[in-house]
Amino acid sequence: MLFIANAEGWPGIATTVEMLRSGTTDSLTAMVAGISKVEAETKVRSVGHGGWPNMLGVMECDAAVMDGTTRAVGSVGAVPDTIPVARLAHEVMKQLPHVMLTGAGARRFATETGFSVDDVLLEDSKRVWWERLEQEMTPEQKAAFPNTPLAPLLKTITDPERVRDTTVYLSADPSRGIHAATSTSGWAWKYPGRLGDSPIPGAGFYADSRYGAAACTHTGEMTMRCATSRTIVLAMKLGYSLSDAVKLAVDELNELTDGFLGGVVIHAVDAKGNHEVVNFRCQGEIRYWLWDGAMPEAELRAAKTI
């Protein structure tokens, strides 16, 4: 058994590890239970209750799960008024013939399946959101807000390193398969309705129990353009080693020369029990959690910087 997660996933690591260790539930359920802890933790400022709103001050959360054995996917995007969006994505996978629900439709399904209507936005997040937005607006724009053009403000309000992270969990087990789960509040001060890569199969995550899985954090606009997670899994299907598959994906990201460019962190596992976490262009040290069946508890490790 192998389990990895990015550093921000710390609130749910012990929960997921214990459930995986006990073997009393399937791996996806264990990872969703762990990510639900992250979503509820206000100290994690990129996911769920501790996350940041869009330009209108509305929290829109994204999440996804993928069963690598069946390749079934459940995904939700731009969901309002909902903290446990990974669990909602899991319900989409289990109950609907669809892969993805977004916006008001996702919230309607949440209500139909017994999810509470949550007050997602922290007062501190609301304060910081407005103070940052206020810096960029003229007196006329502030007087007209929210009925003022938002796109020009987006060019100056972005802080690419601080506000665009995701929680990703990957598990691999010879008997229980290889699976992926993600959750995020997305790019802070994003244009309303923006989806990053986290809920997009093949971009922010992909899993195939025959070969491996991958999930990405940070600049989703890049991994969507390159289908980064699917590239890694497909390369392994074609005979690449895990390291060479990740290198191929990094090379593709490096080929991008225009559009919005930034850093990407790739988390990947294969069916042979190997894992790799790579920091491509992100500032500072990137760390991640690793646990296998022989460890008493998960360990925090440093990603490889490229």
Image (tube, rainbow, N blue to C red):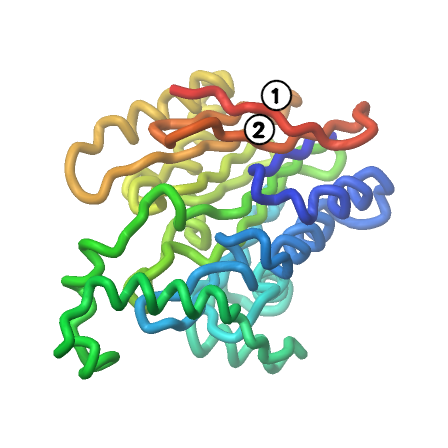
- Estimate the spatial distance between the alpha carbons at disc 2 and disc 1, rounded to whole Å: 6 Å
Labels 2 and 1: the sequence-earlier one: 2
Q: Please state the horizontal and vertical placement of residue 56, each as a whole percent of the image.
A: 32, 73
Q: Could you say which disc has been placed on residue 274 in the image?
A: 1
Q: Nearer the viewer, residue 81 or 71?
A: 81
Q: Nearer the viewer, residue 235 or 140?
A: 140
Above or below: residue 32 compared with residue 135? above
Q: Please state the horizontal and vertical placement of residue 117, each as a whole percent of the image.
A: 59, 80
Q: Amino acid at mark 1?
A: Asn
Q: Could you say which disc has been placed on residue 269 in the image?
A: 2
Residue 284 in view, yes or no: yes
Q: Nearer the viewer, residue 177 or 180?
A: 180
Q: Say which residue appears at 49% left-offset and 73% top-offset.
A: 106
Above or below: residue 126 compared with residue 24? below
Identify the image quadrant of residue 6. top right
Q: Secondary structure at mark 1?
A: loop
Q: Say which residue appears at 19% left-offset and 82% top-offset.
A: 143
Using a 10 Å C-alpha cutoff, classify the residue at mark 2 as few (fewer than 14 neighbours), some (14 to 19) or many (20 or more): many
Q: Please state the horizontal and vertical placement of residue 14, each as a whole percent of the image.
A: 76, 43
